[in-house]
């Protein structure tokens, strides 16, 4: 695995700026250096900037001998040139001749960074870490980046993978483009060296909202495992009417929004997805009774992260005080990668690598992980302590399977077996025989040959978790029943429901419980009803209805984003669920449970409810 290092152009700029700044009387970095009347120094800097490090080093050394008053500064420049030329021993010799007290503050930082570089080249990470014991908060950004990157390398070389990963996580927020991607690859690779058990132990020690947690989860996923999620169960609705200082009634937590920039792709593969979200957003906007409701402007977020960043910049330039979007994971990462955002963002997906949003912003998406985690807890609440997992082979289904296992085992559930269904398969008899071999069959149906109950298994303590599209589920469920397992309860993510009433097809799914957005069943108070909107808007039908609901919720969340970030027990009653913000800046959805009966899906509890958290 290659080690991420800052790109040479940035290092060249970093080292060249102090001298050039003096020549132009623009002291960006306040250090002593040659006078403007020194053409030899200018020639040396020019050779350095052109990559002729050997010549630059010799010129700096000659100048240092000729000008004792500038010796420290010039030998530092020579050492930097020699280091860039790969001559570590010569660079060390150049540094040895420097009296540090004659260097300016930032030159002293550069001196110590170069000492650390040399120590790492000589396999002396402890020495490097001594040199890197520098407070970075007040350093100019190029020096700060170099310090963090060197510290991460030194910590890794000294065997402290966790510390190295944490340093890279701190570095990551200041990087962009290929540098950020390379740093993220190195971060995950560093964590992987710890192994799954150590990663889980480390995760257990982290405080809520720790920035390292998403990276631990990503490293674990590389090993086919995942961390359990914290499923929020908020109990305080936002918007409670409260008297203000003038005794006027105000909605608690409400902050008015004036101009919204909505970032969505206009064309391309996601045009239909964007249309459903856009329709939902404007449906909520037009239903807003506030006479001072916000203005909404739509910006094309294009097909790349760069396009999304440009769209964000245009919205901000136009005066937006809130931005919603973009839609794709890489585009969300691109916008978040800008670091501090002058205007808060409610992203319409989770970032590509699970990184936390910048302060004041949040990420909102329909993630399969959270659905699977809630399914696991729901089964535990039902007393089902043993589970068989059967999912599609798609990436989203794999994420659901990993999340389910992590959550289920975290609550002392036992996953007996797992299976994946490939597209195009229609006969699942062999798979059913294998994956359900240890599960008791129904008393009134024959079992598959070889299927026996495990010793001590209690009737009713075993369930099946599935995550797949309706087409696959309609093939699978009848075969499970024919195999003698009609009495085993089945639980699913929302993917099993096509979103519309279709009893002719969905009768094969009878008995299956699944978690889903309450709006699909008109079970969300205070939100425009789906049954009414669907008469006029095609996007409110079918599986796209969840995206429509997401658009409704995005609009509803905006006035309460600041409140939710500070009050973890508060929630917005949303179309996609009860909406709360966790410590990592993610909007979580607490879903309702529905069940198929006579080919129709019905909410089990009639609407949103908060059940007790499992112990």
Image (spheres, rainbow, N blue to C red):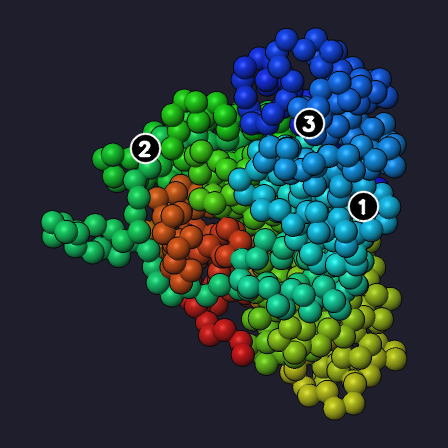
Q: Position of residue 472 (x, y in %)?
A: 72, 55
Q: Nearer the viewer, residue 207 or 452?
A: 207
Question: Can residue 273 be seen in the rendering of this structure?
Answer: no
Q: Nearer the viewer, mark 2 or mark 1?
A: 1
Q: Residues within 10 Å of mark 1 (few under 14, many from 20)?
A: many
Of 284 and 160, the residue lying toward us: 160
Distance CA(mark 2)–CA(mark 1): 55 Å
Quarter containing the C terminus: bottom right
N-terminal of the two: label 2 or label 3?
3
- Can you tell which mark lies on residue 258? 2
Residue under numbered circle 3: 73
Q: CA distance from mark 1 to mark 3?
A: 21 Å
Q: Earlier in the sequence, mark 1 or mark 3?
A: 3
Residue 100 falls left or right of residue 424: left
- Judge depth for marks 1 and 3 and give the one in front: 3
Q: Between marks 2 and 3, how big is the CA–CA gap?
A: 53 Å
């Amino acid at each position: 695995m290659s080690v991420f290092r800052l790109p040479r152009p940035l290092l060249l700029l970093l080292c060249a700026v102090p001298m050039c700044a003096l020549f132009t009387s623009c002291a960006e970095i306040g250090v002593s250096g040659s006078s403007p009347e020194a053409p030899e120094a200018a020639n040396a800097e020019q050779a350095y900037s052109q990559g002729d490090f050997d010549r630059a080093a010799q010129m700096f050394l000659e100048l240092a001998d000729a000008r004792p008053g500038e010796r420290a500064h010039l030998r530092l420049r020579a050492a930097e040139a020699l280091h860039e030329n790969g001559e570590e021993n010569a660079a060390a010799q150049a540094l040895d001749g420097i009296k540090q007290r004659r260097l300016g503050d930032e030159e002293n930082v550069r001196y110590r960074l170069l000492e650390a570089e040399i120590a790492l080249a000589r396999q002396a990470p402890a020495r490097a870490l001594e040199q890197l014991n520098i407070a970075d908060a007040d350093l100019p950004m190029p020096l700060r980046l170099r310090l963090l990157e060197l510290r991460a390398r030194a910590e890794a070389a000294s065997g402290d993978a966790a510390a190295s990963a944490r340093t890279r996580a701190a570095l990551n927020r200041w990087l962009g483009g290929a540098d950020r991607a390379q740093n993220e690859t190195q971060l995950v690779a560093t964590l992987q060296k710890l192994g799954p058990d150590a990663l889980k132990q480390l995760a257990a020690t982290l405080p809520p909202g720790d920035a390292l947690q998403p990276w631990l989860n990503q490293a674990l996923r590389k090993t086919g495992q995942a961390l359990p999620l914290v499923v929020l169960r908020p109990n305080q609705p936002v918007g409670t009417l409260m008297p203000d200082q003038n005794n006027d009634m105000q909605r608690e937590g409400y902050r008015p929004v004036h101009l919204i920039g909505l970032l969505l792709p206009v064309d391309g593969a996601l045009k239909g997805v964007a249309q459903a979200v856009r329709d939902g957003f404007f449906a909520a906007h037009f239903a807003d009774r506030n006479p001072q409701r916000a203005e909404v402007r739509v910006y094309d977020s294009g097909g790349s992260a760069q396009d999304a960043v440009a769209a964000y910049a245009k919205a901000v330039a136009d005066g937006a005080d809130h931005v919603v979007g973009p839609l794709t994971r890489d585009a969300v990462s691109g916008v978040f990668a800008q670091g501090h955002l002058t205007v808060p963002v409610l992203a319409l997906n989770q970032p590509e690598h699970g990184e936390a949003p910048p302060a004041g912003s949040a990420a909102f998406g329909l993630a399969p992980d959270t659905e699977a985690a809630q399914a696991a807890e729901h089964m535990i609440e039902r007393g089902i302590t043993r589970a068989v997992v059967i999912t599609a082979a798609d990436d989203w289904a794999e994420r659901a399977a990993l999340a389910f296992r992590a959550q289920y085992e975290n609550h002392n559930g036992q996953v007996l077996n797992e299976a994946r269904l490939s597209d195009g398969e229609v006969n699942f008899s062999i798979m059913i025989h294998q994956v359900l071999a240890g599960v008791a069959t129904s008393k009134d149906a024959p079992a598959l040959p070889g299927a026996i109950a495990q010793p001590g298994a209690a009737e009713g303590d075993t369930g099946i978790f599935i995550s797949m599209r309706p087409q696959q589920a309609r093939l699978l469920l009848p075969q499970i029943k024919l195999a003698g397992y009609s009495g085993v309860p089945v639980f699913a993510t929302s993917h099993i429901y096509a979103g519309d009433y279709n009893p002719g097809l969905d009768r094969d799914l009878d008995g299956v419980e699944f978690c889903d957005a309450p709006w699909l069943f008109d079970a969300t108070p205070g939100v425009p009803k789906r049954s009414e909107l669907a008469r006029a808007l095609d996007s409110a039908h079918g599986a796209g209805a969840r995206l429509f609901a997401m658009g409704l919720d995005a609009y509803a969340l905006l006035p309460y984003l600041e409140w939710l970030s500070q009050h973890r027990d508060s929630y917005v009653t949303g179309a996609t669920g009860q909406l709360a913000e966790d410590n990592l800046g993610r909007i979580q959805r607490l879903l309702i449970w529905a069940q198929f009966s006579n080919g129709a899906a019905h909410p089990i509890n009639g609407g949103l409810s908060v059940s007790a958290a499992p112990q």
